[in-house]
Image: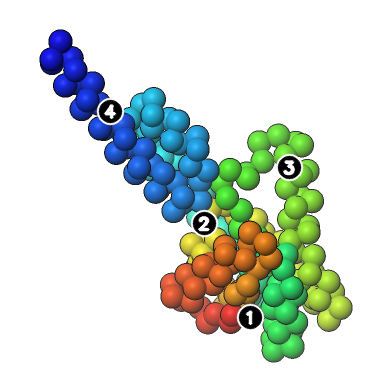
Amino acid sequence: MTIVFEGLVIWLIIVLVSMLVVAYLARRWGHDPFGWLILAAAMGPIAIIALVGTRHKNEETARRGAGSVRDDGPVPVIIACDGSEATSRAARYLTSSNPGSRIVLLVVEGHEAEPRTSQESEQQAARVARMVAPAEAELKRMGVASETVVVYGKAGEEIVRYADASGATAIVVGRRGAGLSRALLGSASDHVVRNAKQPVVVVS
């Protein structure tokens, strides 16, 4: 009985540690931690292995997807879009300073937002359209074309990764977002400034 009890205690400790690790990694990598916590409670360290494997798969997918945007046209200038007024100001700044660039409106969503059904795809399309609308309106007013790209993960990391993979010449981000995106884009802009190889313009 004592051996069984000790085994249960050890397993409980392993599960608790696994849950802490999974919660930290899931938040850091832009996943919804709730589902991963349940998996860790049931499977212990196996959940950590699964989460790391998912991360590697997502990185490979992102590299392939981002690499495919390069073409024979000018390398893009990226505007990170969150639907706020700062997005519109970023577009206004860019068109006035570098009107000949090919512009990519980049939207970053968490992995949990990746659509799995046609209905979710339609909902995402409407959501993304709202997020890029301020920038698109400003660009259209200036007669500048743009394309919209959606990637998944943690905002700052994905902006930097996409910029590298697409050969971007510059990144324009807003420091302040709207509502929940205020904290997201604020931290994202700081990460981009610290880690991007390209020149970064932060629009307040």
Residue named by callout 2: 154
Mark number for residue 168? none
Badge 1 vs badge 2, beta-carbon distance below 8 Å: no
Rate crowding at label 4 as few (under 14), some (14 to 19) or many (20 or more) other CA atoms within 10 Å: some
Residue named by callout 4: 12
Rate crowding at label 3 as few (under 14), some (14 to 19) or many (20 or more) other CA atoms within 10 Å: some
Left or right: where 201 falls relative to 47: right
- Check disc 4 and give the amino acid type: Leu
- Check disc 1 and give the amino acid type: Val
Q: CA distance from mark 1 to mark 2?
A: 20 Å
- Residue at 52% of width from left, 43% of height from top? 32
Residue named by callout 3: 121
Q: CA distance from mark 4 to mark 1?
A: 48 Å
Of badges 3 and 4, nearer the viewer stands 4
* Residue 142, above or below 39: below
Q: Position of residue 191 (x, y in %)?
A: 47, 70
Image quarter of residue 50: top left
* Residue 171, above or below 55: below
- Quadrant where the C terminus is found in the figure: bottom right
Image quarter of residue 145: bottom right
Mark number for residue 203? 1
